[in-house]
Image (cartoon, rainbow, N blue to C red):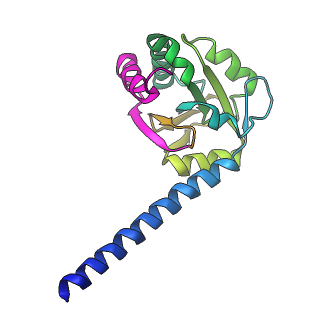
Amino acid sequence: MDRCRIKTVFILLVLTFSFFCKSKEDHIKEEWKHLSFVKPDGSLLEPKFWSEKKSVLYFGFSHCPDMCPLALTNFGRASLILGEKSNRFRFIFVTLDPERDSPATLKNYIQNFPGKNLTALSPNAESLTKLTDLFGIVREKVGDGKNYRIDHSNFIYVLDEDLNTLANFPGGVSANALATKLRELAGPEN
């Protein structure tokens, strides 16, 4: 009888845990539906954007002196290493500084980096707050006036077409290591 109770309690715990995990995953997907982004051409991003390809995300700002340029350079190099498989991904730079990073600024900024499929997105203030919460991004404005900087977390995230996180990397990951993992995530040729 005790074994039966233990099994029942165990099953209930597993079901409860899976329910809450699923609920959090569903919550994240629901939040994404309400995020607003502006593309470099000034138009609003359509929600279907996220379901068309896997996304490789990096959060930073265009005035960043070191971490962001390194991550975006490695984005570009990884896409070149991947060759045709890079077409299965979107490499996305999301600004953490929409105050200075206008769509035009971002359009010019991303042209400085090698590779394919790189786009930049500018979230509105509410979406930026939600994104930092969803990804656990640390973001702090340091300094006054126009010469401030944004101290921020330094991670790259890979999401599938259903917005599930497939992998994450430190922002300084090498292009080769990133390309190797992305090649694996891209799956076999069709």
Residue located at (54% from left, 51% from top): 133
Does the magenta run of residues contain 166?
A: yes
Residue located at (19% from left, 87% from top): 2
Residue positioned most to the front: 190
Residue positioned most to the right: 43
Q: Which residues are magenta?
A: 163-190
User: Relative to residue 146, is residue 73 drawn left or right?
Assistant: left
**Above or below — where is 126 with respect to 80?**
below
Residue located at (74% from left, 35% from top): 45
Task: In this rendered view, identify the residue nearer to me: 63 or 58.
Answer: 58
Residue located at (73% from left, 24% from top): 40
Q: Horizontal and vertical percent for residue 85? A: 50, 18
Question: The N terminus appears in which quarter of the rendering?
Answer: bottom left
User: Relative to residue 148, is residue 135 drawn left or right?
Assistant: left
Does the magenta run of residues contain 3?
A: no
**Above or below — where is 109 with respect to 38?**
above
Q: Quadrant of residue 96?
A: top right
